[in-house]
Every structure is written in structure tokens, then in C-alpha cells.
Amino acid sequence: MTYRLEVQSAGPVPEIAPPPDLTQALLNLLNNAADACPDDLLATLDWDDENIFIRIRDHGAGVPLAIAEQIGKPFFTTKGKGFGLGLFLSKASVTRAGGSVKLYSHEQGGTLTELRLPVQPQEA
């Protein structure tokens, strides 16, 4: 497996107080990308005053338009194994932290997964 990490912002790195399940959500998103294509994964870290962005780019088959709306729903999988809950649970964890997860077909092939997290944790 080969991967690269790029940090795109300059300046002080913002701090967040993520819930414990957020680490598992991030690992799941990285594993999904590696399952799609284990070579040449690219993860980028970027931030502004309000959000931290983690983008994961794989060079696999991408997200077919015919199933794009189904991806991330419980019990839907494209892998042929598992229960289709990993992405669903990852999205739920990120949403609870006030963020979002979006998947896009990349124009040059593969999938781009964008994870957005707020710099300041949401009040409970």
C-alpha cells in the first residue's frame, strides 16, 4: 500500500475535541479508500477559521452514478462482503460531531471523500 499525506494550510493547527468514535470513523473512511485501490492514496489536511477538512482520494473505480444515492445507507455495500454499515456509522459519528462526510467521483477517476469537522465543538 502506498499513500501520501499533504498539509495544505499554513499557520497554527486548530484544535478540536472529537468524540471517541470519530477516530474509528476516520479509520473506516481510510480503509474504504484502501479497499477501492490500495496504491497511491492521497490524504490532504486543510483548515480555515471554522472547519478542518480531511480529503481522501483513491484511484479505484469511483462512485457509479446509478448507486451514488445508495452509498452510505445502512445495509448497502459495493464490496460483496460485510453489512454495509461502516460508511453509515462513520457518517453518523461525524454528524454527531457537527461535521459532514461527502463522497464524489473524481474527474480523473477514483473517489474523493471529504470529511469536514468544525473547529469549535458543538454545544451538547
Image (cartoon, helix red, strand yellow):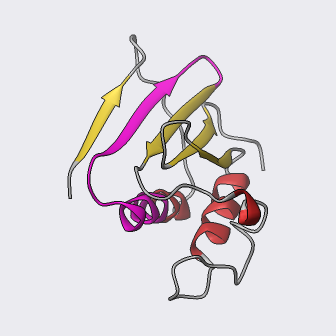
Q: Quadrant of the N terminus?
A: bottom left
Could you tell whether 81 is left or right of 63 in the image? left
Q: Quadrant of residue 56?
A: top left
Q: In which quarter of the image is residue 67?
A: bottom right
Indicate whether 56 appears above or below 93. above
Name the residue rendered at 72%, 53% in the picture. Answer: 95
Q: Point out the residue furthest to the top here.
A: 11
Could you tell whether 43 is left or right of 116 in the image? left
Name the residue rendered at 66%, 39% in the picture. Answer: 121
- Give 61 or 35, whichever is nearer the viewer: 61
- At which x and y percent is residue 32? 46, 65
Q: Quadrant of residue 11?
A: top left
Q: Does the magenta stretch include residue 56?
A: no
- At which x and y percent is residue 78? 58, 76
Indicate whether 102 appears above or below 50. below
Q: Point out the residue furthest to the left here.
A: 1
Could you tell whether 33 is left or right of 90 in the image? left
The residues colored magenta run 27-50
- At which x and y percent is residue 79? 51, 79
Name the residue rendered at 54%, 33% in the picture. Answer: 53
Name the residue rendered at 55%, 49% in the picture. Answer: 18
- Give 89 or 57, whichever is nearer the viewer: 57
Q: Does the magenta stretch include residue 43?
A: yes
Could you tell whether 84 is left or right of 66 in the image? left
How many discs appear?
Answer: 0
- At which x and y percent is residue 71? 69, 66
